Amino acid sequence: MEIKDSLLKEFAEVYGDAEGVRVFFAPGRVNLIGEHTDYNGGHVFPCALTIGTYAAVRKRQDRKLGFYSMNFSRLGVIESSLDDLKPDKDAGWTNYPKGMMWALEERGYGLDCGLDILVKGNIPHGSGLSSSASVEIVTGYFLKELFGFEISGQELALIGQYSENNFNGVNCGIMDQFAIAMGKKGHAIFLDTADLSYEYAPINLQRAKLVISCSNKKRGLEDSKYNERREECETALSEIQAGMGINTLGDLDEQLFEQIKMAIKDEDRRKRAKHAVYENRRTIKAVQALKNNDIALFGELMNESHISLRDDYEVTGEELDTLVEEAWKINGVIGSRMTGAGFGGCTVSLVEDGAVEEFIEKVGVAYQERIGYAADFYVVEIGSGPCELD
Ligand code: GLA
């Protein structure tokens, strides 16, 4: 059965019938390089995936909201209302669509009736491939379409980030929501987070694949650690700003950073800022390498990115390090690094076609042996931004 039909069938079972229901999709994302740079005024280079979140939706006559996830079907329909758009620890995944509704209303896009919503995601749970931003953007997109709001993809991304920051309490940057709202098939997005200027770069992986390795590490503290890293960078920036006029860490290059780094009083903080500066420069170099068709250099920069995230930013951990270090041992791996926030989640590897099977086999066995449970592997494709299914 096609995905749309299966959603409509389930919708009818859950809500009585599927008359007038519309079905939407928003992707997940993977970041190729440029990690923890987006809240430091640096560059990122993510792409949307063909996996993501589907939503079947219909307006109601009243102000009630029905939320049903096929991924958490045992929870049944979770009921709420437009008059109750407040974050609630017990509301689970519904905090993401609710946050988006709240953020739209905050921006003046009023919702004049409630909705029945059914979602189904095929992004591995907790993988760091932005399932939450995917839910936010699919929600923003279907609300825009159903209520006729004129909102650009870029504004949708900003509203998604606003909801994540202010409704869900994660002080994330703009990368995830932007990559998802602005995704383009076969392309990665070279985004300057200082001013949101961007460029699409074609990813023509002749004879190579993008392989995601999912650590299956249960994340717990990652959100608070994420906010902690962000604060460390902000403090480092203000220490530098006491002596020179820069706006963000992204304004520095490597040489300048080395000259002024002692303005940062604490060694850990200095390491965090170093990562932010060097990673931004690496991202610019990596995109240039891609333009020059120098895929080997792109891969080397991916590897350097991982080392910096491991040693200076300290957001990898044994699971992600094992996946990456085992990947590096395999002939035909062009580059491999953790992707996303870290502390668990996934790695992304560029692997030559002929080595993909061996990669999955060998990295899988070594991971199981060292970590004690299995990793999952996905060969992924670069997909487009949000859409309505015909
Ligand atoms: C998470 C955040 C992003 C970005 C990455 C790290 O995915 O949501 O904004 O900061 O971590 O690069």
Image (cartoon, grey):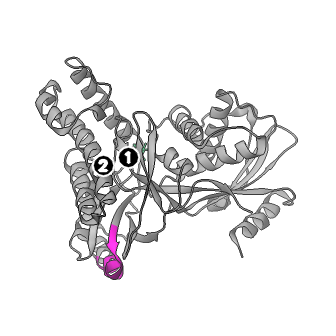
* Mark 1 Cα shell of 10 Å, populated few (<14), some (14-19), many (≥20): many
Q: For ligand 1, which image quadrant applies?
A: top left
Q: Main secondary structure of the magenta part?
A: helix
> The disc labelled 2 sits on which kind of residue?
Thr
Q: Is residue 128 visible?
A: no
Name the residue rendered at 48%, 67% in the picture: 381
Foreground of the two, 236 or 364:
236
Q: Say which quadrant the C terminus sits in.
A: bottom right
Q: Please give the label number shown on residue 284.
A: none
| Horizontal and vertical percent position of residue 36 | 34, 43
Mark 2–mark 1 CB contact (< 8 Å): yes
Name the residue rendered at 39%, 72% in the picture: 209
Q: Please give the label number shown on residue 283.
A: 2
Whether residue 64 is in magenta: the answer is: no
Q: How far apart in space, not on screen, are marks 2 and 1 (Cα)?
A: 7 Å
Q: Earlier in the sequence, mark 2 or mark 1?
A: 1
> The disc labelled 1 sits on which kind of residue?
Val
Does 266 sit above or below residue 280?
above
Q: Is residue 387 visible?
A: yes
Residue on which the image places disc 1: 44
**Residue sitting farthest toward the top:** 242
Q: Is mark 1 within 8 Å of ligand 1?
A: yes
Foreground of the two, 196 or 240:
196
Whether residue 360 is in magenta: the answer is: yes
Foreground of the two, 346 or 92:
346
| Horizontal and vertical percent position of residue 315 | 29, 48
**Residue sitting farthest toward the front:** 292
Q: Is residue 305 left or right of residue 4?
A: left
What span is in magenta?
350-362
| Horizontal and vertical percent position of residue 114 | 79, 41
